[in-house]
Image (cartoon, rainbow, N blue to C red):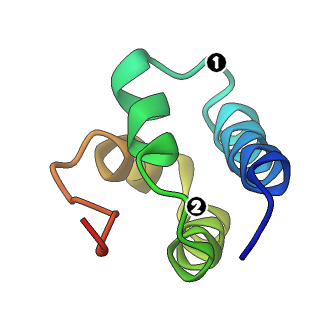
Amino acid sequence: MTPASHIHEWQNKIVGICEIKLRRKLSNKELNFIRCTDDTIVLEMLEDAVGDLSDIELKPYLNSEIHLDFGA
């Protein structure tokens, strides 16, 4: 089991990647999209996705209705 502090740091890293690409702070909806899961496999997938997407592709991705917490 991954400690909660590590999960929080990982989520913050993903938020940072997004904010750099979008050149702005994320909206609450976008933050919730990232913070809705504590599953390490999902976070790894999310980090890879936001790293690969362009800024134009990233905004709709973060605002999508995809549910990332597969364990729920």
Q: Is residue 51 left or right of residue 67?
A: right
Q: In 3D space, how far apart are the residues under numbered discs 1 and 2 (Cα atoms)?
A: 15 Å
Q: Residue furthest front?
A: 1
In the rendered image, the quadrant that contains the N terminus is bottom right
The residue carrying pointer 1 sits among few (fewer than 14), some (14 to 19) or many (20 or more) residues within 10 Å by Cα, namely: few
Q: Is residue 7 left or right of residue 28?
A: right
C-beta proximity under 8 Å, tags 1 and 2? no
In the rendered image, the quadrant that contains the C terminus is bottom left
The residue carrying pointer 2 sits among few (fewer than 14), some (14 to 19) or many (20 or more) residues within 10 Å by Cα, namely: many
Q: Is residue 54 left or right of residue 14?
A: left
> Of marks 1 and 2, which one's residue comes earlier in the chain?
1
68 above or below 42?
above
46 above or below 62?
below
* Amino acid type, callout 1: Arg
Q: Position of residue 54 (x, y in %)?
A: 55, 58
Q: Position of residue 60 (x, y in %)?
A: 29, 45
Residue under the image location 64 percent in, 18 percent down: 24
In the figure, residue 70 lies in which quadrant? Answer: bottom left
Instruction: Count up the numbered dots.
Output: 2
From the viewer's side, name the closer residue of 50 and 68: 68
* Amino acid type, callout 2: Val
Residue under the image location 50 percent in, 46 percent down: 34
Q: Secondary structure at mark 1?
A: loop
From the viewer's side, name the closer residue of 40 and 59: 40
Where residue 50 is drawn, which disc sits there?
Answer: 2
In the figure, residue 6 lies in which quadrant? Answer: bottom right
Residue under the image location 34 percent in, 26 percent down: 29
Q: Which residue is mark 1?
A: 24
